[in-house]
Image (cartoon, rainbow, N blue to C red):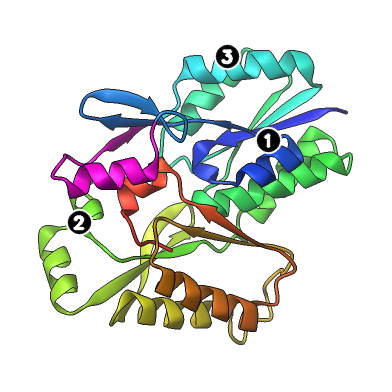
Amino acid sequence: MRIKITSDSTCDLSKRQLERYNITMVPLYVVKDNQTLKDREEITPSEIFRHVDNGGALCTTAAVNIEDYTQIFSEFSKEFDAVIHINIGADFSCSHQNALIAAQEFDNVYIVDSKNLCGGQGCLVLRAAQMAEDGMDPQEICGNIEKLREKVEASFIIDRLDYMRKGGRCSLIAEFGANIMRLKICIEVKDGKLQVAKKYRGSFEHCIDSYSKERLIGRDDIDTQLLLFAQAEASPEAMSAARKNIQEFGKFREIEEIEAGCTISCHCGPNTI
């Protein structure tokens, strides 16, 4: 069977990965000064950060609408035997619900909730593409992805809390306290939701060093096939600390550095890994 894998722009896969597996990303939307722009296509994370740094209002995000999904599914359902679309987690966006509604018009379109975002979602998208290459049927691929999503470990550290505070995800008091105590927050995806995993103290580079070691040292439960290493305009020092520990303690066969797209960057801000 010829199976087409699609996902939302929140999967943040690199251009190389998308081309290698012929994966199509459907863009979410970013709202900036009453303009609605397509993630990655009409606006970049750098443009968002510069806008906010220059005193502009925080950009917001909007889900992929039903019409967009219908257009994509209509095109690929004719060209391929099956289309498997892997969404950003349903608790993060109504994109998943919109995709389900759009898919009702097609007999060969399958929708999977990744219960994840960014690199966590990206890992599942890549696995689905590899399964399709291996000749699995669409039902088997979807079933395997639903099992694998419970094993994905996705987490990140943010340097600035003002983006989360402005987006309603962090109170002003919590932000003030974290800034005074030089705390950096580690957030992880658990059961399809975001939760604070740990708080680190010190410079962002020091916190990244501790965080990456803790995530890798002494682990015998990690599939070392692939690590997706995402960042949003992270400092060279922080990137260097993370790379060093990944190389020394990770033992991954493939490491792919990816750039967090606009949807993720709108909520996390710059200097996020």
**Under tag 3, what secondary structure?**
helix
Asked if labels 2 and 3 touch by Cβ distance under 8 angstroms, the answer is no
Q: Residue at x 51, y 58 (%)?
A: 230
Please name the amino acid that badge 1 sits on. Answer: Ile
Q: Which residue is mark 3?
A: 71
Residue 268 found in image quarter = bottom left
Numbered disc 1: secondary structure: loop
Please report the residue visible at 22 percent of the width from the left and 24 percent of the height from the top: 34
Secondary structure, mark 2, is: helix
Horizontal arrangement in the rendering, residue 52 relative to residue 263 (left or right): left
Tell me: 191 left or right of 253: left
Query: In this rendering, which labeled residue sits more in front, label 3 or label 1?
Result: 1
Location of mark 1 (residue): 23
Residue 114, placed above or below residue 254: above
Distance from disc 3 to disc 1, alpha carbons, whole Å, reads 16 Å
Q: Amino acid at mark 3?
A: Gln
Q: Which sits in the foreground, 47 or 4?
A: 47
Q: Position of residue 152 (x, y in %)?
A: 60, 60
Image-quadrant location for residue 228: bottom right
> Residues under labels 3 and 2: Cα distance?
37 Å
Instruction: Name the residue at 75% across, 13% down.
Output: 78
Where residue 161 appears, x then y in whole percent? 23, 60
Residue 116: tell me if it is visible. no
Residue at the spot of label 2: 162
Which region of the structure is painted magenta? 43-62
Q: Assess whether residue 168 is covered by the magenta stretch.
A: no
Splitting the image into 4 quarters, where does residue 31 fall?
A: top left
The type of residue carrying mark 2 is Asp
Label 2 to label 1: alpha-carbon separation: 34 Å
**Quadrant of the drawing holding the C terminus:** bottom left
Query: Above or below — where is 176 with respect to 16?
Result: below
